[in-house]
């Protein structure tokens, strides 16, 4: 067997996943808050980048479309092919492709409120969120007014610091005392003090203790109520009142009377304090009606208009920079130029996707959610000649402000549900119908899932009972046995 050593040339075409291309893809999926934070970080780190004056967004978009059509098409092709590659790699491999700049975007900050060009359509974000006292601050304020030793206040501070947003003690007291080197007996006494504070039920370790604390610390103290909570909580949850009456050897009427008292209790004592600090949703795009037409405009407020620093550009063009300085400036200029193009591409894509959504969902904007049409990513991808994965990234965590409210762009993508007349209706519209049916039911005789199926059939909607159950669960609606009210 003879071996033949020879040279040959082979021409192949491969897509190179450069850091710049990775950045362009990742910028597509960033939320507005993340993008603002990332741009601010780049402005601080790259001396070539600077913030220029904002221009009229619609005019700018039109100019960029005409001047950069060829460049945009090439970038779209690159990104579509790169998207296929990114979607095929494992999550571990994706992490390896991330670079240091993106690690700084994991913690989201709340930026200053934004406004729109059409001020009549723009919500007043300053009135959306106000910060009140946290649950811990409220509890410590009450403890500060008590006659307690410094050690006791220290234990009280640690206990309240371990109360979660629901108002429950998040860590077992024994573990907390061991970790903080407290005397367990003293810690139990201090916990008893905390559990007597407002709001009622705070500091409980489970639902049973929470309800019992509210009964025992109020004028509603009642032996039957306490026994129902202490011994029959599972039956109470399933509304099996007959079983409770039989076990306690009392009448059903007596059980119902005491269950009504339990119904007035608060299972989540920390609810009034709102839990986590809410995030302000700033729309990426606005849709409003102008005459007979629906108009789409980008929200550029809060996004700096980036440009290259003219001083450094002159240094390169006049060959004033040399050696390492020249290489550094060229590298930063290349990075800045690509970032500017990537952001422009991101904004153009959001604009085009929203335009396509508005065109396809005009009935929704005109008449409401009942007229939302079935639509999938492929429909929009074909409209704007882009990859489905690109559309998916663009619609994720992007919000549109409309006369009917603020919606995530993902909201408009729905599967189809068949009608008896041959037309299809969006699953979101069917969910709205189910919600309305439940709202109008007799609370003492609520509709079963099968009955909802029959009512939908009368409206021309064909669904299986298990599909109705799935939609009901997605809406957070309890089954009929738990919706039934006896009083």
Image: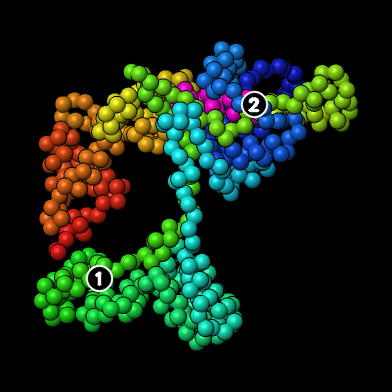
Q: Which residue is mark 2?
A: 53
The reply to whether residue 115 is visible in this rendering is yes
Q: Nearer the viewer's eye, disc 2 or disc 1?
A: 2
Q: Quadrant of the N terminus?
A: top right
Q: Which residue is mark 1?
A: 262
Please name the residue shown 75% across and 27% down the image. Answer: 309
| Magenta stretch encompasses residue 74 | no
Residue 252 position, x and y percent, is 11, 73
The answer to whether 332 appears left or right of 146 in the picture is: right
Q: Nearer the viewer, residue 280 or 392?
A: 280
Whichever of callouts 2 and 1 sits on the residue coming sooner in the sequence is 2
Please name the residue shown 16% across and 39% down the image. Answer: 456
Q: Which residues are magenta?
A: 338-354
Residue 455 figure quarter = top left
Q: How dense is the environment of label 1, judged by Cα within 10 Å: few (below 14), some, or many (20 and up)?
A: many
Q: Nearer the viewer, residue 357 or 383?
A: 357
Q: Which mark is residue 385?
A: none
As displayed, is residue 77 above or below residue 106?
above
Query: Helix or strand or loop: what does disc 1 sit on?
Result: helix
Residue 295 position, x and y percent, is 41, 22
Q: How dense is the environment of label 2, judged by Cα within 10 Å: few (below 14), some, or many (20 and up)?
A: few
Query: Helix or strand or loop: what does disc 2 sit on?
Result: loop
Please name the residue shown 86% across and 30% down the image. Answer: 325
Q: Which SS does the magenta portion mostly show?
A: helix
């Amino acid at each position: 067997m003879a071996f033949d050593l020879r040279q040959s040339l082979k021409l192949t075409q491969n897509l190179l996943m450069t850091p710049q291309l990775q950045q362009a893809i990742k910028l597509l999926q960033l939320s507005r808050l993340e993008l603002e934070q990332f741009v601010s970080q780049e402005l601080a780190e790259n001396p070539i980048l600077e913030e220029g004056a904002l221009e009229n967004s619609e005019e700018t978009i039109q100019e960029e479309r005409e001047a950069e059509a060829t460049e945009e098409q090439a970038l779209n092709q690159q990104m579509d092919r790169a998207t296929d590659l990114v979607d095929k790699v494992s999550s571990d491999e994706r992490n390896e492709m991330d670079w240091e700049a993106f690690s700084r975007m994991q913690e989201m900050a709340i930026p200053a409120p934004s406004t729109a060009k059409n001020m009549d359509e723009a919500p007043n974000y300053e009135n959306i969120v106000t910060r009140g006292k946290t649950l811990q601050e409220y509890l410590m304020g009450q403890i500060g007014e008590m006659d307690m030793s410094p050690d006791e206040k220290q234990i009280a501070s640690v206990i309240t610091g371990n109360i979660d947003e629901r108002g429950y003690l998040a860590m077992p007291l024994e573990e907390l005392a061991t970790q903080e080197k407290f005397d367990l007996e003293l810690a139990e006494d201090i916990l008893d003090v905390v559990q007597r504070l407002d709001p009622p039920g705070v500091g409980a370790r489970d639902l049973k203790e929470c309800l019992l604390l509210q009964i025992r610390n109020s004028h509603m103290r009642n032996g039957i109520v306490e026994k129902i909570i202490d011994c029959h909580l599972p039956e109470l949850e399933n509304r099996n009142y007959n079983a409770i009456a039989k076990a306690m050897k009392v009448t059903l009427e007596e059980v119902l009377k005491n269950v009504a008292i339990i119904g007035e209790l608060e299972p989540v004592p920390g609810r009034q304090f709102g839990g986590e600090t809410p995030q302000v949703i700033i729309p990426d795009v606005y849709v409003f009606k102008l005459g007979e037409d629906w108009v789409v405009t980008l929200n550029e407020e809060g996004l700096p208009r980036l440009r290259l620093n003219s001083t450094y550009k002159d240094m390169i063009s006049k060959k004033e920079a040399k050696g390492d300085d020249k290489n550094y400036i060229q590298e930063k200029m290349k990075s800045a130029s690509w970032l500017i193009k990537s952001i422009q591409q991101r904004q153009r894509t959001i604009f085009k996707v929203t335009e396509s959504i508005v065109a396809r969902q005009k009935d929704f904007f005109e008449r409401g959610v009942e007229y939302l049409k079935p639509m999938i990513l492929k429909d929009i991808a074909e409209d704007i000649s882009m990859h489905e994965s690109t559309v998916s990234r663009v619609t994720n965590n992007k919000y549109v402000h409309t006369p009917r409210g603020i919606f995530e762009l993902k909201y408009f993508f729905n599967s189809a549900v068949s009608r008896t007349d041959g037309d299809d209706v969006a699953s979101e519209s069917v969910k709205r119908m189910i919600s309305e049916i439940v709202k109008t039911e007799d609370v003492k005789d609520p509709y079963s899932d099968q009955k909802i199926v029959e009512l939908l059939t009368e409206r021309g909607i064909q669904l299986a009972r298990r599909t109705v159950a799935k939609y009901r669960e997605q809406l957070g609606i309890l089954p009929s046995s738990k919706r039934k009210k006896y009083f």
